[in-house]
Image (cartoon, rainbow, N blue to C red):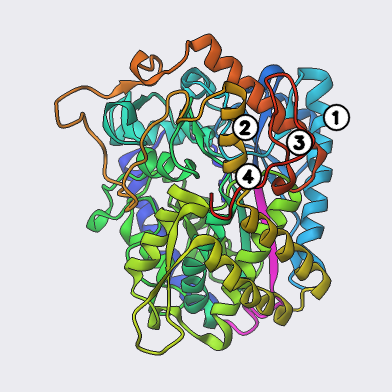
Amino acid sequence: MGREIDRMEFTEQGYALFRAQLLDCLRVLEKVVATPGFGAAPATVGAELEVYLVAERGRPASVNEAVCKILNDDRVALEVSRTNLEMNLTPVELTGRPFTTMAAETEQVLARITTISLPRYGARPVPIGTLPTLTPSDVGEDALTDAPRYHALERAWDQRRPRPFTLQVGEGRAGLIQAQSVALQGAACSYQVHLTVPPERFCSTFNAAQLATAPALAAAVNSPWLLGRRVWQESRIPLFERGFGDQRGVNDRARVGFGRRWLSGGPLAAFKESVHGHDVLMPAVFPAGAGALAEREFPALEELQTHLSTVWSWNRPVYDAGGHLRIEFRALPAGPTPIDMAANSAFLIGLTLSLATGGKDVAEDLPFRYARENFYRAAKEGLDAHLWWPSSTPGAAPRQLSAPDLVRELLPAAQAGLESAGVCPEEVRALLDLLDQRVTTGRTGAWWQTQAHRALSGSTGDDIQAVPAAPAEGSCAPHRPDREGHPAQDVTTPPAHVRSTPRDSADTLAADLTDRYITLCTRGAPVHTWALPSHPHGVSDEPEHPPAGQ
């Protein structure tokens, strides 16, 4: 979805032309989705995995351009920060063993990147939601990847807000930070799963995806650290929403978010909302307009795709000129291992398909506010969250269950959804059993990182630079100085009062934690089997299992 462009500056005339082309794209798309054969191919799944390049002692390495050039692999692309790469896995049919196939390709591409990056630059690719060792200087202006798209994105944001810009990832002064660049997006790495959906089932499947996201996210959290602070179990969510949620669109719609209502109105509804609800960031007009492209069976609609790539909904509609529509599930974090990501995506896709069976629309079963609340509770609390779910009795009030209980209750539905699509029963059982074990033990990636940090530091509290979590509603409104009039914190100088240990000690702990994560991640065993450090210089042989949901 990160469309390549060749310009960094645009004129007012260019913005006007692009807006006109966007409307043309919508008109053409309406004809395209009605074309016989569009969306008729068998369902496929694919994924994009964002990774950090990490050097000695867990430090991020700003070598993505050099690695990508030497690698010369179409599956590997640059990301907004010099410390990140994106892997684009080959789409596969949703039959047989699609998730283990993607996991195997993930391992293969990670290994291939390592063969280039490790001997030349002392860095290896690491799938993790947020890197514990990341510091403010790692996401400043110098961290921006030198590519026209990212320079254009930087300039577009400069026109919408001054630099440095303020965002709040937690409560009070400790939660207010200032950032200098869109390279801050590189502080969050995701595993973005794609599912093709026939046009006639797009709305109901999209709504099912919205409802399925919260329980899947609660079981997958892997991002408790953000710039030296412990924020949410999935800190990518407040980082993106507070940093890039920009509500200057029509009707004050957030550019990053979960949404405001269930989708209705046919397969074009989500695309129309993105176009009409958000002004243009990068007006890259392509040589042939939408009208000319309409003469072909499935036009590229480049302007539409470029615009959609700058609206970061947690579940996003995608048009593909190959002849289909897709849902891009953007909420899952990177890591910890390929098999963990396979289990996460299998559960999310299977549950989505099950909830939308026979064209059923979950919008009839649950008010949207409950699904939205679920999402932010899951991101904030992980398996400690309590989530709403439709009652099995028609017309009855929604039920509220602990996240572990809800996930276990939904596992048979996810199994049915996958098997009805043609996924091999053995693969389904193996992946969902893995997820069941993770939920039963409570050992998510976020849990392991938090407990490993406590073990290494000897702390029983919130540790270094802990920040109280922001409200679960996940407001995307711009944040200003706090009510007492104190200015927002500059992330280059975290205040001493939010640190419980000296900076050098904090850096050492973060490095030790990251080194152990990388070691276990490289071994490839699922995260619920990972051992906790028994002392600062070793890793225990036997994991200690917490109660479910802890």
Q: Nearer the viewer, residue 286 or 232?
A: 232
> SS for tag 4?
loop
Q: Give the mark nearer the N terminus: 4 vs 2.
A: 4
Q: Is residue 329 left or right of residue 259?
A: right
Q: Give the mark nearer the N terminus: 3 vs 4.
A: 4
Mark closer to the observer (2, 3): 2
Which residue is labeled 1 in the image?
Answer: 115
Mark 2 in CB contact with mark 1 (< 8 angstroms): no
| Residue at 76% from the left image edge and 56% from the top image edge | 90
Image label count: 4
Q: Could one spot residue 198 in this view of the protein? A: no
Neighbour tally class for label 4: few under 14, some 14-19, many 20 plus, Cα within 10 Å? many
| Residue at 66% from the left image edge and 54% from the top image edge | 438
Q: Is residue 100 above or below residue 542?
A: below
Q: Which residues are magenta?
A: 34-49
Q: Quadrant of residue 515?
A: top right
Q: Nearer the viewer, residue 286 or 514?
A: 514
| Residue 258 on image: x %, y % | 40, 58
Q: Could you tell me the amino acid type at mark 4?
A: Ala
Mark closer to the observer (3, 4): 3
Q: Could you tell me the amino acid type at mark 3?
A: Leu
